[in-house]
Amino acid sequence: MNSAGIFDVVVVGGGPAGATAAHDLARQGRTVALLDKAGRIKPCGGAIPPRAIRDFDIPNHLIVARINAARMISPTDKEVDMPVENGFVGMVDRDVFDEFLRVRAAEAGAERLTGSFEAVEHDADGVTVVTWTPKGAPDGTAPLRLRTRCVIGADGARSQVGKQTVKGAEKIPCVFAYHEIVEAPKGDEIAKYDARRCDVVYNGRYSPDFYSWIFPHGDKISIGTGSAHKGFSLRGSVGELRAATGMDQLKTIRREGAPIPLKPLKKWDNGRDVVLAGDAAGVVAPASGEGIYYAMLCGRLAADAAAEFVATGDSRALATARKRFMKAHGRVFWILGIMQYFWYSSDKRREKFVKICQDKDVQRLTWESYMNKELVRRDPMAHVRIFFKDLAHLFGFARA
């Protein structure tokens, strides 16, 4: 902090968004505090595209598996393999990956603090204050205070920073995700398991409105599911999936659950001194549930917006984070939202969706867009062909 005891930015939350924001700000020479709870691991399939590895300098030792195919499994157990051409999907373990990002931020100059966020307040002189309680503090301990010019709220889907400061943040729609990390099988004891393939299960038995997954993580596996339906047993669903695939015999290492937002908030800043990032801003892709790359990009854009605000004092700079993100990815999120709303609504439609995944144009454009995080525009006729094939499935002209 400066001689007046004021940080340029306080980042609340040390996941991929918050840690990236803190790292970028520290490298720019800004004084930054990174406040994070210790010990929490987010339930996540752990997939990151090659672009994330390039853009954010992810070292190879964090990539615990390189996936070269996805298997889409329909409600009637029909299987469609989608090989990844000219690339791969990287898999990371969130406990190790997130900690690496936090350590990197601290090494760049961020002051790392471990504890719980309490509130955003303002002193009599107008300076913003973040109050927090250190981990392990006795009950009744008075919160500590961090004076700052700007706050980045990257504290997850149920963001307390957002709820306190940004109108509408409390209404963010979520899917609830749950997964179990288990030891990978030795040899071929699980017949259909492939350590280089992600299995994506579209079946109302395991999720009435989303999907379930089996994602390899080197010597471990993430087996999980998601649903927005209250009362649906996610843990029971994963137990059934493990039993159905023979993975109930594998040793369970840990279990994790959390809400996952599936729609970007309409506003990420409060017009004064706060901007949201990552899950707090709602940047998890609909339909796929992919979040790591988008969170890190959102953290970077929030850092840029905060730095501009600190340099100029113009609070309008805070809104640039959302504007830049939506310009780059808003159309993709809109398309994926429509896909999820329509194709995940019933097993009959899921069956047709998996059928569509057999199409080579669909496979190629899907992987190219995923790996590079850009809509593929150089082959317009492929998009036309997919459009008419989709219509055929929608109206029942194609066989399921």
Image: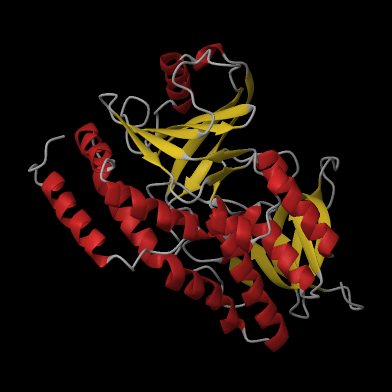
Please report the residue visible at 61 percent of the width from the left and 41 percent of the height from the top.
Answer: 42
Left or right: 287 in relation to 317: left
Q: Is residue 19 above or below residue 353?
A: below
Q: Looking at the figure, which quarter contains the C terminus?
A: top left
Left or right: 74 in relation to 289: left
Q: Is residue 188 above or below residue 397?
A: above
Left or right: 207 in relation to 154: left
Where is residue 56? Give x, y as percent.
65, 60
Picture quadrant of residue 377: bottom left
In this view of the protein, which residue sits in the foreground, 322 or 373?
A: 373
Where is residue 217? Give x, y as percent.
60, 33
Left or right: 138 in relation to 383: right
In this view of the protein, which residue sits in the foreground, 146 or 252?
A: 252
In this view of the protein, which residue sits in the foreground, 71 or 253?
A: 71
Say whether residue 388 is visible: yes
Extreme residue in the front direction: 86
Picture quadrant of residue 234: top left
Please report the residue visible at 59 percent of the width from the left and 77 percent of the height from the top.
Answer: 318
Please report the residue visible at 61 percent of the width from the left and 16 percent of the height from the top.
Answer: 186
Where is residue 48? Give x, y as percent.
55, 49
Colouring convention used in this rendered image of the protein:
secondary structure
Q: Looking at the figure, which quarter contains the N terminus?
A: bottom right
Say whether residue 164 is visible: no
Q: How many marks?
A: 0
Extreme residue in the right direction: 3
